[in-house]
Amino acid sequence: MTAPFETLVASLHGQSLTIAARILTRLGLPGESARRLGDEPPAIDPVRTALLIAAVRYGSHLPEARACLKAFAALPQRPPLALVSFNLTARKPAQQTAGESAHLRKTIAGFGLEPVAARAVAGKLNYPR
Ligand SMILES: Cc1cc2nc3c(=O)[nH]c(=O)nc-3n(C[C@H](O)[C@H](O)[C@H](O)COP(=O)(O)O)c2cc1C
């Protein structure tokens, strides 16, 4: 079964990709793959919901996430957007909603987004690495 959304991931060290795979498995879509964003903004499916999972580095979502959202915001007709911010601040229970998370607030306001869902999820800091 094709997912009603396409999964786009901005990840430096791979944790966000792990989360994406986990979400797809939990939704019963284990064969569905997430697309890892690169330097070029992706062509965004105009019909399916865009699920963007974006890691934070030094106070901002990764540049490829920002490039993707810029391209998304410029679409004449935007598909629905679901946003997951992956960062360490979200380890605190009061930093996980679009209203609470500064990363989500800044990104949503900065690109003029109206996500149908937005959530901050606790990331992982791999100290030895
Ligand atoms: C160099 C570095 C800078 C980071 N900066 C922030 C930050 O400013 N705020 C935050 O909440 N998390 C920050 N994090 C945590 C990452 O968002 C978290 O480690 C996440 O799991 C990384 O996902 P990835 O493995 O998909 O790249 C930082 C992590 C690293 C390694």
Image (cartoon, helix red, strand yellow):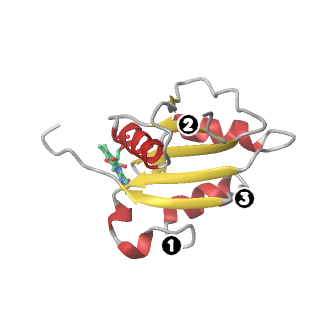
Helix, strand or loop at label 3? It is loop
Question: Which element is circle 2 on?
Answer: strand
Quarter of the image with the N terminus is top right
Q: Is residue 104 left or right of residue 48?
A: left
Query: Which amino acid type is shown beneath numbered disc 1?
Result: Glu
Instruction: From the viewer's perspective, tell me whether residue 48 is left or right of residue 39.
Output: right
Q: Amino acid at mark 2?
A: Leu
Measuring from the top left, give residue 50's x and y in whole percent: 65, 43
Q: Amino acid at mark 3?
A: Glu
- Residue under circle 3? 114
Residue at 39%, 49% (x, y): give it.
Answer: 58
* Residue at the image position 81 percent from the left and 38 percent from the top: 75
Residue 82 drawn above or below residue 47: below
Q: State the residue in front, 60 or 7.
A: 7
Numbered badge on residue 100:
1
- Residue 18: give x, y in percent of width and height: 36, 40
Q: Residue at x 48, y 50 (%)?
A: 60
Q: Residue at x 57, y 60 (%)?
A: 118
Q: For the residues marked 1 and 3, what is the alpha-carbon distance in whole angstroms? A: 16 Å
The residue carrying pointer 2 sits among few (fewer than 14), some (14 to 19) or many (20 or more) residues within 10 Å by Cα, namely many
Q: Height in image: 47 above or below 61?
A: above
For label 2, the residue is 8
